[in-house]
Amino acid sequence: MNYAPLLEPIYQFLHCRTPQAWIDEARKPENLTLLLTDHMVCELKAAQTAVFIIRKYVADKPSGDAILAWLKPYEDFIYRDEQDGNFINAHKNLTKSIIVRNELPWADDLVEMMVLLVKEELHHFYQVWEIMQSRGLPYRKITASRYAKGLIREIRTYEPEALVDKLICGAYIEARSCERFASLAPYLDEQLEKFYISLLRSEARHYQDYLKLAQQISPKEIAPRVQVFGEAEARLISEPDGELRFHSGVPAV
């Protein structure tokens, strides 16, 4: 299948492509466990961000508490060494309806998008863990990359601009993830290649959903802020990085 129609808008949106030096390092067999572990954690972090946005901006307290509980089995596994990993059963319980506490014109759209995102990211979390289990790869805690922190520094501190910036930040993270799936997939074994291509197909338009919602919320045209985050994201990808992670920069020698 030709994935160019999916990838071309992503390539145009991002300010740089993944450096070959990152691909060369990431494809090494000895780095597979690290990359899959970081990928799994990134899926959880994406879900956490979406839950945070729902709870902070639109959900009433009972709904917010219920959706926060969605994350508990996954957070217990990653952060608290509770290794039961019953993620299939946990996923079946993601059924709570969100009651919106305000009349913001974009509230329902935000809830619809974020709830779907949470469910998809947690499902992908389980898929990565399933692959790791099938290969006998253990989960061990790793440090976070500088990538997300570098983008968060650009977020403004007043509303609604802060929310707009968070959504633009999310757009770049989603777009880079897809670009990395496509960059790395040809160098992996058949199972992993198929898996990353399947993620590419399911997530390729997430960044556009983020941007659409950001513009819907923003009182101003978002293009200047998109440019700011695009430049910051490209620096993080292009500059030397001391740790290999799924969204890290050029491996430092």
Image (cartoon, rainbow, N blue to C red):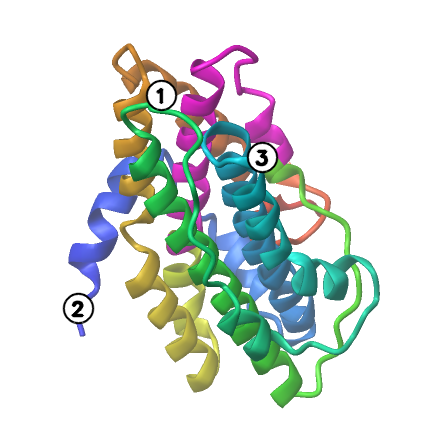
- The amino acid type of the residue labelled 2 equals Asn
Residue 142 seen in the current view: yes
Q: Is residue 112 magenta?
A: no
Residue at position x 73%, y 44% in the image: 242
Looking at the image, do the residues carrying marks 1 and 2 touch, with CB atoms under 8 Å apart? Answer: no
**Which type of secondary structure does the marked residue at label 2 adopt?**
loop
Q: Which residue is mark 1?
A: 227
Q: Position of residue 105 (x, y in %)?
A: 27, 25
Task: Name the main secondary structure of what is drawn in magenta.
Answer: helix
Q: Judge whether 76 appears above or below 48 on screen.
A: below
Occupied quadrant, residue 132:
bottom right
Q: Which residues are magenta?
A: 149-178
Q: Quadrant of the N terminus?
A: bottom left
Residue at position x 52%, y 45% in the image: 63
- The amino acid type of the residue labelled 1 equals Gln
Mark 1 Cα-neighbour bin, 10 Å: few <14, some 14–19, many ≥20: some
Q: Nearer the viewer, residue 251 or 45?
A: 45
Occupied quadrant, residue 38:
bottom right
Task: Determine which of the numbered discs, if any, sits on residue 8 in the image.
Answer: none
- The amino acid type of the residue labelled 3 equals Glu
Q: Which residue is mark 2?
A: 2
Q: Judge whether 75 appears above or below 84 on screen.
A: above
